Amino acid sequence: EGATGCSSVETVNNFDKEKFFREAWYITHYKLGEGELQAIDKNCTKLLHQKTGDKIREVFSNYNPSAGTYSYDISFVKVKDFVGNSGKYTAKNVIVDKDGTKIDERTLQVSHIDTDYENYSVVYVCDTSAPDFYLYTVQSRKKNVNDVKGQVEAALKKVNVKLSDLFDATTLSCQYDDDTLNKFLAQQFSEYEK
């Protein structure tokens, strides 16, 4: 992998966008690149989604307990950006401030390795221009995956990752900025939704 680009991972077949892109997901565990996570990278993340016709918007609130600060990003996806009917797609990810003003932008390759749509999802994310920036995440509709640990571990095994290799975000003192997330779902971002 490394400089040669993003890893190719097995993804969900017949990925159900309607079932997945609704309500909230919480990132409970994650691995960010190689090496140890610094305090600045230990975040509590909540995602909200909206699928409207052929457009999908994902909004992320990232809270860093050690700094007591929030950061935000928004992914814009079109149904045609998916590879066939798999859970793999390319997203335009825009890092924004609390008002929705762009700070930075990147293209992310997102691969849904496994999900049951109701309880858990295991995802691989990679920045196509900086493949050393990659992320394995475990997401839950609740704030933990205790009830589905077996399924999560089996999904991670497909990509040779152990749950114990991932940072456990449930150990943090988490907060979530629902007001800003809901605002970003409603806000117009026409320059990103071409």
Image (tube, rainbow, N blue to C red):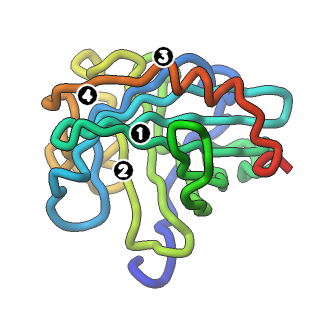
Mark earlier in primary sequence (3, 2): 3
Kindly tell me whether residue 153 is visible in this rendering.
Answer: no
Give the foreground label among 1 and 4. Answer: 1
Which residue does the numbered mark 4 point to in the structure image? 150
Give the Cα distance between marks 4 and 2.
17 Å
92 vs 168, left or right, is right
Which residue bears the numbered disc 1?
122
Query: Spatial distance from mark 1 to mark 4, Cα to Cα?
Result: 12 Å
| Residue at (56% x, 34% y) in the render | 59
Q: How far is disc 3 from disc 1 in space, using C-alphas? A: 12 Å
Q: Position of residue 73 (x, y in %)?
A: 52, 44
User: Is label 3 in contact with label 2 (beta carbons under 8 Å)?
Assistant: no
The correct choice, above or below, for 171 with respect to 191 in the image is above
Q: Position of residue 176 (x, y in %)?
A: 36, 23
Tag 1: amino acid: Val
Distance Cα–Cα, label 3 vs label 2: 19 Å
For the residues labelled 1 and 2, say whether their Cβ atoms are less than 8 Å apart: yes
